[in-house]
Amino acid sequence: MAKDFSMERIAVEMGGDPSIPSNYARKEYIHGEIADISTGEQLDFLNKVVGRITKFTSYLEGTVTGADAEVKLQIGGVDVTGGALVIAYSGSVAGTIDEVEPTALNVLAENDLISVIGDGGSTDAQQLWFSIEITKSED
C-alpha cells in the first residue's frame, strides 16, 4: 500500500490548515550584504508584505578587530527591539554566524521602510551577509 506523503495530508495530520502546507509558506526573506562591516553603512529596503520581522541573521566573511560592530534593524526610522546584532571582535573568524529574534516594534505594514544600519565600530574591512526573516500575517 502506497503512503500519501502530500504536503496537504502532512499539514492536516499536524493540525494545520491544508491550504497552508507548512509554516514556510508564510515566510518572506530579505537578503543583503554590507560590503565593509568596519564602515558605517545603511541599506534600505521597501517592504512588500504585512507581517513582522521574526529573525535577523548574519554571516561574517572574515576577522574583525579593534572593537565590536553593531548592525541594527529599523522600521520607518524606529529601532526594532531585540533587532541588533553584535559582531564581536573577540573570537571573530570567517564563517561566524550571529542571530537575533526581535521581540517588539517589529510589525510591518506594506511599503514600510526597513533599514539595516552598521555602526562601523570594528576595524579590518570585512564583508557581512545578512538575512531578515518576515513572517507574513494570516489573512
Image (tube, grey):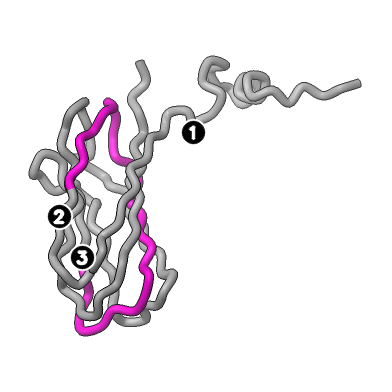
Mark 3 sits on what residue?
A: 70
Q: Secondary structure at mark 1?
A: helix
The answer to whether residue 16 is magenta is no
Q: Residues within 10 Å of mark 2 (few under 14, many from 20)?
A: some
Q: Which residue is at a point 57% across and 16% down the rendered structure image?
A: 18
Gap between marks 1 and 3, in whole Å? 29 Å
Image position of 126 (left or right of 74)? right
Disc number placed over residue 24 in the picture, else none: 1
Residue at image position (24%, 52%) is: 82
**Is label 2 or label 1 in front?**
2
Provide the residue span drawn in magenta: 44-69
Q: Position of residue 73 (x, y in %)?
A: 20, 50
Could you say which quadrant of the image residue 110 lies in? top left
What SS does tag 2 mark? strand
Residue 21: x and y in percent read: 56, 24
Secondary structure at numbered mark 3 = strand
124 relative to 113 in the view: left or right: right
Q: Residue at x 19, y 41 (%)?
A: 114
Quick one: label 3, few (<14), some, or many (20+) residues within 10 Å?
some
- As measured in the structure, the alpha-carbon distance from the residue carrying label 2 to the one carrying label 1 is 28 Å
Query: Disc 3 versus disc 2: distance between alpha carbons?
Result: 12 Å
* Circle 3: residue type: Glu
Which sits earlier in the primary sequence, circle 3 or circle 2?
A: 2
Of the numbered discs 1 and 3, the one sitting upstream in the chain is: 1
